[in-house]
Image: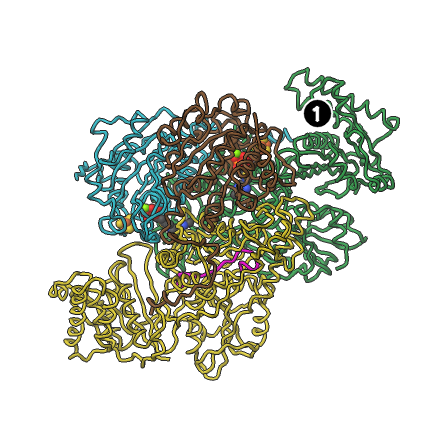
Chain colours: A cyan, B brown, C green, D yellow
Amino acid sequence: MSIPLDSGTAKKMFAFHCGNQCTWCDGCGDYGIWTAVKRALSESDIPPHGVLLCYDVGCHGNTSDKILGYRFHGLHGRVIPFAAGAKLANPRLPVMAFGGDGASFSEGVGHLVHGIRSNYPIAFVLHNNGNYGLTTGQASSLTQQGQPMNSSPNGIPEHTLNSMDFVFSLEPTFVARAWSGDIDMMTKVLKAAIGHRGFAFVDILQACPTYNDFATHSFLMERCYDANAEGHLPDDFAKARALALDTSKRIACGVLFQREDIPSFYEKLEPRKDKKTTAVEEVQIVDTRAWEKEFV
Amino acid sequence: MSIPLDSGTAKKMFAFHCGNQCTWCDGCGDYGIWTAVKRALSESDIPPHGVLLCYDVGCHGNTSDKILGYRFHGLHGRVIPFAAGAKLANPRLPVMAFGGDGASFSEGVGHLVHGIRSNYPIAFVLHNNGNYGLTTGQASSLTQQGQPMNSSPNGIPEHTLNSMDFVFSLEPTFVARAWSGDIDMMTKVLKAAIGHRGFAFVDILQACPTYNDFATHSFLMERCYDANAEGHLPDDFAKARALALDTSKRIACGVLFQREDIPSFYEKLEPRKDKKTTAVEEVQIVDTRAWEKEFV
Amino acid sequence: MTRVSLKVTGAQGQGVNSIGEMCAKGLKRAGYCVFGYKEYMSLIKGGHSSYQLDVASEAIESSETTVDMLVCFNHHGLERNAREVKSGGIILHQTPQWKFSKEVQKTLEERGVRVVYLPSEDVIKKLKAKPILGNVLVTSVVWALLGRKAEELKELVQEQFGHKGEKVIEMNFKCIEEGFAFLQTIENGKLKMENLPKPNLEWKDHLLITGSEAMGLGLIHAGCRMYCGYPMTPSSQLLSFVADMQNKTGMVIKQAEDEITAAQMMSGAMHMGTRAATGTSGGGFDLMTETVSLNAIIENPSVFILAQRPGPATGLPTWTAQGDLLLAVGSAHGEFARCVMAVSDAEDSYDLMSEAFNIAEKYQTPVIVMTDKQIAEALFTQKPYDQKKAKIDRGNLVTDPKALKELKSTDRYNPTAKDGISPRWLPGAEAATYCAQGDEHNADGSVDESAKNAVEQMEKRLRKMKALEREIAEPVLTKIENGKLKIENNDVDLDLLVVSWGSNKGVIMDALKGHKGQGRKVGYLHYTYLWPMKTERLEKLMSKAKRTVLVECNHGGQLGMLIQMSGGPTIKDKILKYDGRPFFVDELQSLLSAPC
Amino acid sequence: MTRVSLKVTGAQGQGVNSIGEMCAKGLKRAGYCVFGYKEYMSLIKGGHSSYQLDVASEAIESSETTVDMLVCFNHHGLERNAREVKSGGIILHQTPQWKFSKEVQKTLEERGVRVVYLPSEDVIKKLKAKPILGNVLVTSVVWALLGRKAEELKELVQEQFGHKGEKVIEMNFKCIEEGFAFLQTIENGKLKMENLPKPNLEWKDHLLITGSEAMGLGLIHAGCRMYCGYPMTPSSQLLSFVADMQNKTGMVIKQAEDEITAAQMMSGAMHMGTRAATGTSGGGFDLMTETVSLNAIIENPSVFILAQRPGPATGLPTWTAQGDLLLAVGSAHGEFARCVMAVSDAEDSYDLMSEAFNIAEKYQTPVIVMTDKQIAEALFTQKPYDQKKAKIDRGNLVTDPKALKELKSTDRYNPTAKDGISPRWLPGAEAATYCAQGDEHNADGSVDESAKNAVEQMEKRLRKMKALEREIAEPVLTKIENGKLKIENNDVDLDLLVVSWGSNKGVIMDALKGHKGQGRKVGYLHYTYLWPMKTERLEKLMSKAKRTVLVECNHGGQLGMLIQMSGGPTIKDKILKYDGRPFFVDELQSLLSAPC
Ligand SMILES: Cc1ncc(C[n+]2csc(CCOP(=O)(O)OP(=O)(O)O)c2C)c(N)n1
Ligand SMILES: Cc1ncc(C[n+]2csc(CCOP(=O)(O)OP(=O)(O)O)c2C)c(N)n1
Ligand code: SF4
Ligand code: SF4
Ligand SMILES: [Mg+2]
Ligand SMILES: [Mg+2]
């Protein structure tokens, strides 16, 4: 796979370079995602101090000290509301949130549901490796049935959650998909996500050679294709949904759905209309006398 | 609306009668649901001691001491896992769970998601009054946009969640809908739910004259119809989904979707295959010597 | 001190609160200090509820168990509350053909209680008024019984319903006149509540405000720009209040999908650099505790409001308790610096908000502010708030561009920082970046699992606790001399030392003002800061006091437990209440004077 | 006592654990008591990890900071751990051309440490074996160094890999022979670890078992038929173990979608009448606390396992701590009876499981069982469990059909029940029905908001606490006399009294056995039951002891805090450790003998 970088991007990317050594397993898809994030930020002309990167807990969360930028590494399952709260306080700063499939479809599934329906202006990146990596390979909601896993020696008795149908049922304003081996594609969709007006859902199918032998690097490489290159336009909800759902033969990647005509959560806040400042800039003693009158 | 009861049912229903006075507001849809539940149980030949009724917290939860039967009144949003845990311990006892739209699509939305995908053999009844009744009328995820509510004087900035699309995205094995004014219909779908093999999702559109003036008794009365009577068969997933989703003109009620060919969670448990007893009956000191051998 | 009380009872939704509030406003404007206390059930409509006003021309912050006037919307009040009426008191009701039980009848007669039946329905029908105007009618009779003028009431009504147009006002006025006229027909127009003390005009311009509203204004005053909450009694009213104010204040208000979300959003907003708060009650707070722990390790200033009600579980949602003090101190896993403080009335519900943020930002750690249903929903007569007192202290927050440039990543969690307080700077600042790291980390937020680092960082974070302990105030002693209150800074000898916290303050003060035994030296030691726990002053005062009593609205005597846990003395003599009700002034007085 | 230790280090995933476990098994079978201690990082592969075995012919439950043999998979171990090798010790490694720094080289020479380079890769290549067999090769060299016979190892290998077919076994055997042959080439085949004590065959049939496995077996033994968990170190291994056992035990195992779910499902199952448990670590427990509170008010027996690791927040996931004791006692809103107990090793990890269920069922209230990473993952040499000791006590559970018929709904929460323990009967029973009510309720579970009822029910539930306090045992004193341990029931005079709880027990016992100062009377007081807290015995012993020391793996001295909170004495002399590591025996010995 090709990673053509002009020298400017390379330099900007290097600004995100962190001295700490990566600790993922050999062949882990997190390496690719990590690279693509740095590249997408660089190509979006965002410097390290110009972004807040929020990480959930998990193997992917170990990115938090392998990259520069303002970073946050929070609690298992809770990255979306923290990122959303941060964004609402300072909507000028780009905010990205990263979470695993365990975090996002089990412990924190409520936050994903409400993050999408709230349309917070943040980019959410799903490190979808089909299992709980960091806790040594338990099943997530996205693990296939019939697959023996740590703590599920007989395979899971639950249905595997159809994540794309689920996400589309929440009327998202941006849905993209890529896989961890295709840095070009990841860079493209991440840039689009960063530029999106509301909540951007980016599903990255991530190889986990240690615990996931059903959706491996080569499996993904074989099936994933660039749907946009094949002519898919992301403006049709029903088509996008159908395309996202049908993974029986090939897996459509790229920006699958996007609409920019819906205001974000912040834009819908009545009290913030026409405000020139952000909440971060407004911290000061406020005189309450005018409002005390109605209590007299 | 007619409630034809033969004297046998009336007598059986009376067994559920509880001395405590109802405390709902005048015209509250909970009166109707309360009646229908008693009737459905009676017509299913279930005596009070033969059922566990689990209530969430909310106006609907105040049913817990207005009816007889083994009852449980738990925490806000948590009724589904409690009910599921109870059922797995004693799969012979019918277990019903009741929750509000606030409980089920906000605080406890993760439990609803996983309850459906786990296909626990319980009947879940949604008291869908489109708001947080008991805490005096705040918006729920199902409250319409543009509607000023307690704590949302400008209306909600979030999208209203499309509950039926959401539920169908989880591949449920049973979906029914009724409204709180139609006791016959409620009785019918509740009976079907009680008889279902896995997780039965019953959406009851509930009038709340105090806080909900968008989906009122008369609004519902006008729009709701018996889809089964009009020929809808509940065996086609796609048709059922489309029917459930399209509420623009009329609201389809009845058993919208049902399949009985999928084993419930309990049936899928490898270690419980061919077990004649329930976990409740198995509590005794177990000799562990045989299993200690592998540690020697 | 002369005090009178009147209580309105009825079914929820019948207008009990609106009558209570109208009377309160009228009385305050007429020159009285009013304390309003509500009781209601966890139902929407129909439950038995009451609104009691205790009124005096001096400061008052408590209720009595007995009342001078009882107003009953329906027969339940007549059944349940009639015995509460004092000698010479009045009962006003609207239940046709009501007959008391013989026993009650006898008691009432012995006490000389006058019972007035107001045929509201007939009057309203006669006037062709809407049923809702029954409230105004009842209020006008109460008003007349208080010996006040109809004009005062009309003024209030004009203010409140003026926007509804002239017709409405006209009808309201008619009801008021009818009410006054009605009273003329009773006992030759002579019936009146006699014991209302002389007014004191100092109260006229005070606010009548609940603890929740005071807290809301306090948050706004403190520069809080975002509030994330989730409805749960008794914290919901704070959420409603700041939400209702949002178009005026420009605050970001989020009713989140659950308490975890509310806590996380608040935390994100604080991390980004604004001031934000969240609030809930015990059950919701349980869910927030993991986030409390998170804020401790990332050293994120954060403010959690914990509004208590009786537990466990759903408990008694609309009643009061102080059962969550150990929760505030002991919950949230791991060991770290936290500050727990408790408001006591409308005054410090406002004042402590800026204090909470200042401590949170200075020590970069979670602050838990406790309140309870009693404070949150009681109506206080409150002096307009001092706008000059509060200052914003953002602690070691670096914002100067030059200083920012000089920062190194490793400054953020520098373990050698004085008092453990290292510089903090905000995402977006042109400076070296760091990781706000939830795993144990070293100076720049990189994960570091070494033993040495674990010790350094643990000690860094806990040194903040020591510094905080030095900074926060010892509990405050108020001495009661001849019925007057005075803050006493010396460790004086006392005959009776009462120790307590939170909402008990008002009733204790009121009780001690009337404490029997001339010349006895009594004092009240009030704990505003509960963690870290300071016990030195208590120790000194206690060693000199003849008798020390702990007063709490819980079963365990939790303040006492915390004092002991922190090496302080054991207070054996305890007055504990755990029935969902606050202490009443007469009740507490007799408990305090009982030998033990 | 003679004890030796050997430590295997390497990257996670390289086989450190498998070598450690094989050696442990071989040694135990050869007649040694083995204690295995693991260190690793919160990563999947590549982090530096170690497995240390401490070996003796007497009972041993602790590790030393120094080792007699160090086995290094890669150069990291050579860099980090070489200094830990004792005089006369051995280093076995496989890093070609390795050179120690001058300084280290000097130290090693001074200590007479022998360094052996095993060219594993070459050997494996030569044998055309799979790389994974490197582990067997290394083990065989270690085995030879220990002076043991190849046959013993072959037997183990046969047992473990026999099912993989003859070819595999053959290759394994070749590796073993090659390993033994290799050692013959070193120092004329004379190199050997000299100080392994004489074996004691009593250990032969003991189990080698981790605390998690012991707890899992204990649950199974106690009649626990359902386990609902959610992965979180160090509780995950318990979940994995019971899950792996499910097809044998027939238990219902549920990996839930989160901790709240796990706790609720457990609660539902207990309510229905089976025995069920849940387990988690601090952060997950925070989330479960609301459910703890629920179980308290509905009086539902329930068992929560809280496996500690260092916090706050994510903290140090794979390390150990005792920082959540205040959490266990203070978390969960409202006031209620709870029991907190702590396991200390593989013995009571098994035994206390039936105890926990018995208390939960007898008192119909939540029980919190504490463990920590040290216990959960350490390898203990454990006597096969007594199958006769445990009894099932289901308390006031009514199942007899006749008795059921006689029950009234109002028996369920009868507030006058002796000790607050009212009859409990199960859904489905042919009896009067009741409501397990999360709101405050009266006798049949109907909501009741009256003051009288609130007091009655609160007191009912808290009377259980008093009864529980009476029933549970005081802390147990073990006296150490001439290096021998003896349970002492009298309140004897002591020169040194050590007080602690949980995983410290083993290392304290080991440390005291070797405590210097002949004739000194030393004793260890172990707290198994932490809430309700009993302080009488401690008070007595402490008043007689020359010196009392509190030992804990936390910063606050939390057991000490609980003791004070409960009116017990203050232990000023504290040995606290909070670096994520357990106490090591030599470390503790020197801390205990230091003057203070
Ligand atoms: C409250 C809580 N519960 C459980 C854990 C343990 N835990 C850490 S990461 C993780 C799941 C990891 O799975 P996923 O989110 O898919 O991330 P991955 O490691 O696969 O990238 C869990 C359960 C935790 N840290 N906190
Ligand atoms: C943890 C927690 N958070 C909040 C509450 C307060 N609360 C009680 S009921 C309720 C919502 C009620 O809405 P819904 O579930 O729709 O039930 P309804 O009253 O409308 O029937 C809330 C927020 C609570 N009891 N517990
Ligand atoms: S376990 Fe899987 S996701 Fe985690 S680091 Fe290894 S390969 Fe990557
Ligand atoms: S508020 Fe609504 S849901 Fe609640 S009792 Fe009243 S009408 Fe029913
Ligand atoms: Mg994953
Ligand atoms: Mg609702």
| Front-lying residue, A231 or C295 | A231
| Front-lying residue, C50 or A63 | C50
Q: Is residue A92 left or right of residue A67?
A: right
Crowding at mark 1 (Cα within 10 Å: few <14, some 14-19, many 20+):
some
Q: Is residue A207 above or below residue D203?
A: above
Q: Residue furthest right?
A: C188
Provide the residue designation for mark 1: C156
Rendering coords of residue A114 (x, y %): 42, 36
Q: Residue furthest bottom?
A: D519
Residue C272: tell me if it is visible.
Answer: no
Q: Is residue C528 above or below residue C37?
A: below
Q: Which kind of residue does numbered mark 1 sit on? A: Leu
What span is colored magenta in the figure? D359-375
| Front-lying residue, B232 or D547 | B232
Rendering coords of residue B171 (x, y %): 37, 37
Q: Is residue D346 left or right of residue A177?
A: right
Q: Quadrant of the N terminus of chain D?
A: bottom left
Q: Is residue D573 above or below residue A191?
A: below
Q: Residue at x 88, y 28 (%)?
A: C187
- Disc 1, ligand 4: is the CB inside 8 Å? no
Rendering coords of residue B179 (x, y %): 51, 29
Element carrying mark 1: helix
| Front-lying residue, C210 or D219 | D219
Q: Residue furthest left?
A: D126
